[in-house]
Amino acid sequence: MKEAATAPTAAPSSGRPAAGSRRAAILAAAGAAFGERGYHATSMRDLAASLDLQGASLYAHISAKEELLLEIVDAAADAFLAVADGLDPALAPRERLRAMVGGHLAVIAEKLQSATVFFDEWKHLSGPARARVVEKRDRYQAALRAIVEEGAATGAFLVADAHLATLLVLSTLNWTYRWYDPAGRLSLGELTDGICAYIEGALGAERPQAEGAGR
Amino acid sequence: MKEAATAPTAAPSSGRPAAGSRRAAILAAAGAAFGERGYHATSMRDLAASLDLQGASLYAHISAKEELLLEIVDAAADAFLAVADGLDPALAPRERLRAMVGGHLAVIAEKLQSATVFFDEWKHLSGPARARVVEKRDRYQAALRAIVEEGAATGAFLVADAHLATLLVLSTLNWTYRWYDPAGRLSLGELTDGICAYIEGALGAERPQAEGAGR
DNA sequence: CCTACCGATCGGTAGG
DNA sequence: CCTACCGATCGGTAGG
């Protein structure tokens, strides 16, 4: 999701930043700090200092530290869910899987810090906030499972246990945030192709050879 | 009756717990607490309370909170390394991979809390302790990579990029601590078989069919 | 292993 | 967005 393009027209030189822009900056700084050092290892004063503010000044824009965590985690959960919800149901399982893998990796690559907070810090959310996030994660998993099961039913995939296969595909995908490096040897596209090939092999999808039947 | 009954009489040395047993109990409680709530979210008083002690009493057995974290993380790292070091170099790549996968999953299953702390809390170690753990993790990765590369060389595996394949196998394995349930539907053995099949497929190992050459 | 206590720091509020 | 400040809690020490 793009930021409201900081228009080169008017406004900026008048000094007054856009309404929510300070808040957005706080969220961005929190995402970076929580992702790198962890939620509880980041104090509100640490966070404020990274924005050249006093600790107490943050509370002009937010109401509590956990509010920051919740917004970061929730936005990441929504980004993943948007991938699942955007799948074309008309596609065959293999192509739908490929779209989901590509979308998943794109979220991790483009929102690496938020994704890290999502995966590692969600457990520090309390009560209802946490439950809501778990529910979104479960919906995402269900979407992947539907693909795996359809592929198993049509013979596109050879899986003995769709539930286990789903967990393993998620495992393959989820851990990538721990080693993905935007400046790495492989581009995101190359990485995505390699991961798709790995997962398709794991699911027993026939290797892309010249098979007679077309689609 | 048992708790405050610190016998006013001279305590019989027969009732005295073994030298390091209190320390071991503290480590076990720390592993559980750090794994469930996280290192920084667990206070020394929380930890002490779970052992029916006062916070300050812990320091009769340890010198600092981080010492607990280091010992837990280091022991888990050593458990993983023991798997890599225990591999029979005479085995073929596929069998060596199978042994490593089985050993990896056994560590996670048998030391689930320690493994969780290892994966999620190691980043809170400072300086040299952290560097030592990273080095062990890298040695483990190198051991897996050697298997993948040998398999690629002999044709046992069909992988285009051994480094990427290594990272993906590790991803598949590492995330399991997030969903492994000792009371789950599948036994550890069934899980291991399923994960081996998944990874072998992913690496393009020929499916176990009746091929001429036997063993 | 306890009581008593330390300085530091935490998240957050009051009031401009 | 600042200064000033709050009560709570932190990791850890002293001394028995």
Image (cartoon, coloured by chain):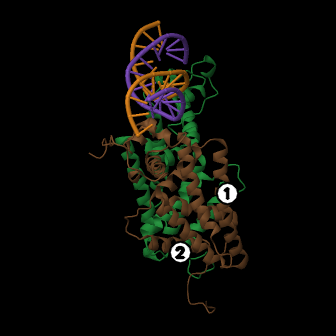
Chain colours: A green, B brown, C orange, D purple
The circle drawn on residue B138 is 1
Q: Residue furthest left?
A: B1
Q: Residue at x 34, y 42 (%)?
A: B9
* Residue A13 in the image: above or below residue A6: above
Residue at point 49%, 74% (across, down): B193
- Kind of residue at disc 1: Asp
Looking at the rendered structure, the secondary structure element under dot 2 is helix
Judged from this view, the residue extending furthest toward the bottom is B212
User: Is the same chain shared between marks 2 and 1?
Assistant: yes
Given residues B203 and B98, the one toward you in this image is B98
As drawn, A51 above or below A87: above
As drawn, the label of residue B197 is 2
Q: Amino acid at mark 2?
A: Ala
Q: Secondary structure at mark 1?
A: helix
Q: Residue at x 40, y 55 (%)?
A: A138
What quarter of the picture does the C terminus of chain B occupy? bottom right
Mark sitting earlier along the chain (2/1): 1
* Spot occupied by residue A161 in the image (x, y as percentages of width and height): 43, 72
Task: Give the letter of the chain under mark 2.
Answer: B
The Cα atoms of the two marked residues, 2 and 1, are separated by 25 Å
